Amino acid sequence: MSDPAKDEIRDEMRRKVFKENVPGFATQRGLEIGALCSPLFTKEEANIKYYDIFPKEELMAQVAEFYPGRTFVDVDFVAYTRSLAETLGDNTFDYFIANHVIEHIPDFIGFFNTVYDHLTPGGKFFLAIPDRRFTFDYNRPETSAGHMIVDFENNGTVDAAEHILDSLIYHTEKLNVYWQDIESQRYNFVHHHHVFNYENFIERIIKPLTRMRYFKFSLIAYCREPEMDNEFEIVLEKPENEDDIHILGEKVELQPRREEAAINEYDYRLQMKEITRSGWFDPIWYLVTYPEVRISGIDPLKHYYFWGAWHGFNPSDKFDSHYYLEQNSDVRQAGLNPLWHYLHNGSREGRKPRP
């Protein structure tokens, strides 16, 4: 049950941090995500709009019992089943606010990328984030950067089953958990998909994701008010140059970009389709020649495409992966699958598929 007196103290602390880092907000256009009945600023105080999954009436029907006597905001951008990007359309804002929101987002990286795309250059993003050590997530392992990357790269969709299971299994109230209930739980928006710790959030999440170019914001403020140890606040800034990113004033050494060909030529799923249709990849030959792949149960084409090609495995007796990469350093340096490159470019350029 929400305590209005404590909530007001909390909100005042948040406003203090926000105003220190977004001094010109009064004349700027902002959007708050998931404000419910605790907006950081009302429309009388700022030029602000509100975004949520449902309109005001439906939100009240779902959660008003936890906030007795509170006034909910009128939602300007209602998502329903649409994504944040689809809901916002071409709208851009000078700042975003999201308090106790990102723990409910299945695709952490995708969410921040969408906010980035809808911020004006130099725009700010203020977030209050719960520290799992002071919540019902106390027993739950903190989310890793690697987990978030897998979520993001999983064809643009996230299977939230693992997130929901962790939310239930490690809940401090020792809830009963049944796999058969997971499907219905997908539509319960109270689950925490990811959990964080103030002490290591920068080292565990922000730094690795930034260095790998998944996280494109500069971090300009990072704090936790002594009176509110169950959450911490961060302020992000959209840089003028996405290659010039700082974390609390320190420039981040970003890893080199992959060659443009490796990023833009084709989606890897389409590349694998081309390989399959070409007849140059023989799955039976591959499994017989490399029994360790057969024993592992891994799909032979995926094994070759993502790993085998770089470790001397051949797709058939017609193509020598190691030879092709040794003879064509541009392909190796670009990170392109050698067989796909040969089929798409190399053959018409006169490059040899084998000695």
Image (spheres, rainbow, N blue to C red):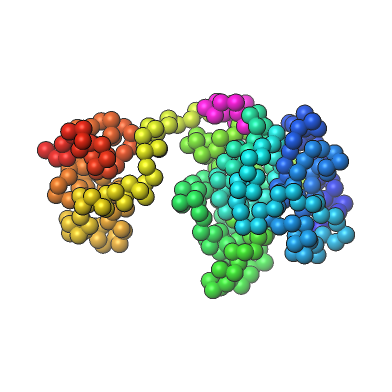
Rendering coords of residue 143 (x, y %): 55, 50
In the rendered structure, the answer to whether residue 168 lies left or right of residue 300 reads right
In the picture shown, does residue 190 fall above or below 349? below
Magenta-drawn stretch contains 269: no
Name the dominant secondary structure of the magenta segment. Answer: loop
Rendering coords of residue 87 (x, y %): 64, 48
Residue placed furthest toward the left: 355
In the picture shown, does residue 291 fall above or below 29? below
Residue occupying the point 57% across, 54% down: 106
Rendering coords of residue 256 (x, y %): 43, 30
Residue occupying the point 43% across, 31% down: 257
In the picture shown, does residue 192 fall above or below 108? below
Magenta-drawn stretch contains 246: yes
Question: Which part of the image, by quadrant, shows the N terminus?
Answer: bottom right
The front one of 217 and 347 is 347
Report the magenta residues as a range.
237-249
Residue occupying the point 80% across, 51% down: 73
Question: Which part of the image, by quadrant, shows the C terminus?
Answer: top left
In the rendered structure, the answer to whether residue 27 lies left or right of residue 154 reads right
In the rendered structure, the answer to whether residue 280 lies left or right of residue 28 reads left
The front one of 32 and 29 is 29
Residue occupying the point 49% across, 50% down: 156
**Residue 227 visible:** no
